[in-house]
Image (cartoon, rainbow, N blue to C red):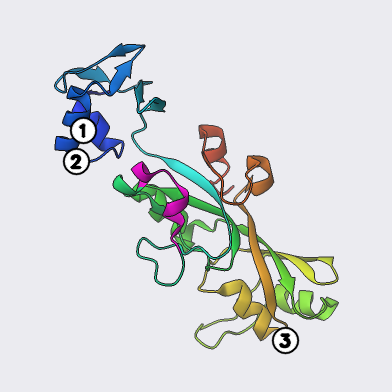
Amino acid sequence: MSKLSLDRILQSQGFGTRKYCRELIEDGEISINGEVVDHYKQTLDTDGLVFRIFDEDWQYREHVYIALNKPANFECSRKPSHHPGVLTLLPEQFSWRDVQPVGRLDHDTTGMLLMSDDGPFIHAQSSPKRHIPKVYLATTAEPVTDELVNTLLNGVQLHDEPAPLAAQICRQLDTHKIEIVLEQGKYHQVKRMLAAAGNHCAALQRTAIGQLTLNSLGLAEGEWCYLSPEQMALLIPSNG
């Protein structure tokens, strides 16, 4: 538990500069338990704190951990170049508090994307040393064959990799669909592996990270949610 002044609380939650947050408070825009709080120096316990601002309730969070069901044609960048950035799908406050994607999905790849403002969490989730499996549903341009599945399981050599890369799991779901599980997280890995195996990726969706599945979150494309401690635990690989 920690105690902070109200202006620092608002700033930490992404509501703007200290000066702007003080103006909001002095203008009577903040209430707690139905009572307006207009003294910005007032200190409050942050544990479990809920305040009302702009007629909306906000819970204080030291860090935010978010799952987004990313639609196609959004870039996983704070400075997108050709398409809107994924941060435009989130409340503006998250940009102010430096929320950023955990790893990246290509602009045309859909599915589960984690986002946070917790640097150590982002680093841990992105580190290849953690061996966190990621599950993808790939739609192929050419029909799926047993040979394709076996090739992906045995490993394919990509021109800029020192050793072949293999899928942890690969199984055919339909004539033009496979489920593939990877741990490495290399650049464009699924697309490049399919190309190296003699096929082509027509569409790609990430359906799970660790044991956390997109289906369990119940998010439509473009929707997001905070992750609960129980859901966060599913992101930790079984080997810890």
Name the disc covering residue 17, or none: 2
Q: Which badge, 2 or 3, is on the more N-terminal residue?
A: 2
Other residues around mark 1 within 10 Å, as few (<14) / some (14–19) / many (≥20): many
Residue 91 is one of the magenta-drawn residues: yes
Q: Which residue in the protein does label 1 denote?
A: 21
Choose between 161 and 116: the one closer to the eye: 116
The spot of residue 193 in percent (x, y) is 64, 78
Dominant secondary structure of the residues highlighted in magenta in the image: helix
Q: Amino acid at mark 1?
A: Cys
Q: Tell me the magenta residue range.
A: 84-94
Q: Which residue in the protein does label 3 denote?
A: 198
Residue 183 is one of the magenta-drawn residues: no
Q: Amino acid at mark 3?
A: Gly
Residue 151 makes an appearance in the image: yes
- Helix, strand or loop for disc 2: loop
Classify residue 95 as left or right of residue 20.
right
State the residue at coordinates (37%, 45%): 92
Q: Which badge, 3 or 1, is on the more N-terminal residue?
A: 1
